[in-house]
Image: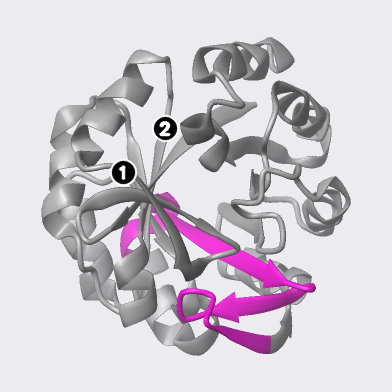
Amino acid sequence: MIVIPAIDISEGKCVRLKQGDMAQKTVFGDDPAEMARRWADCGAQIIHVVDLDGAVGGSSANLEAIADIVQAAETPVELGGGLRTEDDVARVLDMGVQWAIVGTSALSNRPALEQALSRFGARIVVGIDARDGKVAVEGWTETSNVTAIELAVQMQSLGVGRIIFTDIATDGMLAGPNIESTLQMAQAVTMAVTASGGVTTLDDVRRLSLLGPSGVTSCIVGRALYSGTIDLVEAVRIGLESIA
């Protein structure tokens, strides 16, 4: 299993939210690029970046900070937040981002997603964020009537190769991941699943790594790194051992 550290950006700073609530924002650093170097030095194979202002506002809002992250670390970067059109995706991929994460438009603007998939193929990853099993969009400010599994099956039919599945109830809460819902998602599709939300301890990493045979190939760790409940070097080691 690949363990992926997260850098969430708001107003150019590294922050973490609780359950995606912008009103519950904690600033953990003023230099996202330095944070990226730190995680790269710990052995990260991928760095997960979210433009929170872009996710809520609908367009990329921290491009300077994102460019700095890409330049600061040789580690490949995946980016989500505000990527609603093919042009949005092209802009960040041209900046050096390796994977563009499309969320809201996967549900509300299917033609834009299909265009991006046709042009960029495997560099498109779909983020599926679930609240009580239903897909949340617009930076988690709205909840749809579509279930996360329904959307995942649709994405697979379009040729998406990987999804990032986030259980909003666990995100940023340091209470452990929702293993059951993650397993259900992985069993519903054959594409790769990245687990996100609630990873708090090294035991959580171990438990998620056991889902590898079901298709959970990676997990994202956020607040636990900044709060010190997970050491990234050890988490990366556990992940690599699970696929050795």
Q: Quadrant of the N terminus?
A: top right
Whether residue 222 can be seen here: no
Q: Is residue 86 visible?
A: yes
Mark 1: which secondary structure?
A: loop
> Mark 2 against mark 1, which lies toward the viewer?
2
Question: Relative to 5, does residue 187 appear above or below in the rendering?
Answer: below
Q: Which mark is residue 80?
A: none
Circle 2 is placed at which residue position?
46
Depth order, front residue of 44/107: 44
Write down the quadrant of residue 216 in the picture: top right
**Residue appearing at x 43%, y 75% in the figure:** 113
71 displayed left or right of 77: left
Q: Which mark sits nearer the N-terminus, 2 or 1?
A: 2
- What sort of colour scheme is used for the picture? one colour
Q: Residue 127 magenta-drawn?
A: yes
Q: Secondary structure at mark 2?
A: loop
Q: Nearer the viewer, residue 13 or 121?
A: 13
Residue at 55% across, 18% down: 231
List x then y, in percent, for residue 59.
26, 76
Mark 2 vs 1: CB contact within 8 A: yes
96 left or right, relative to 82:
left
At 59% from the left and 55% from the top, the residue drawn is 163
Q: Which mark is drawn over residue 98?
A: 1
At label 2, counting other C-alpha atoms closer than 10 Å, the crowd grade (few under 14, some 14-19, many 20 or more) is many
Amino acid at circle 1: Gln
The magenta span reads 119-144
Q: CA distance from mark 2 to mark 1?
A: 9 Å
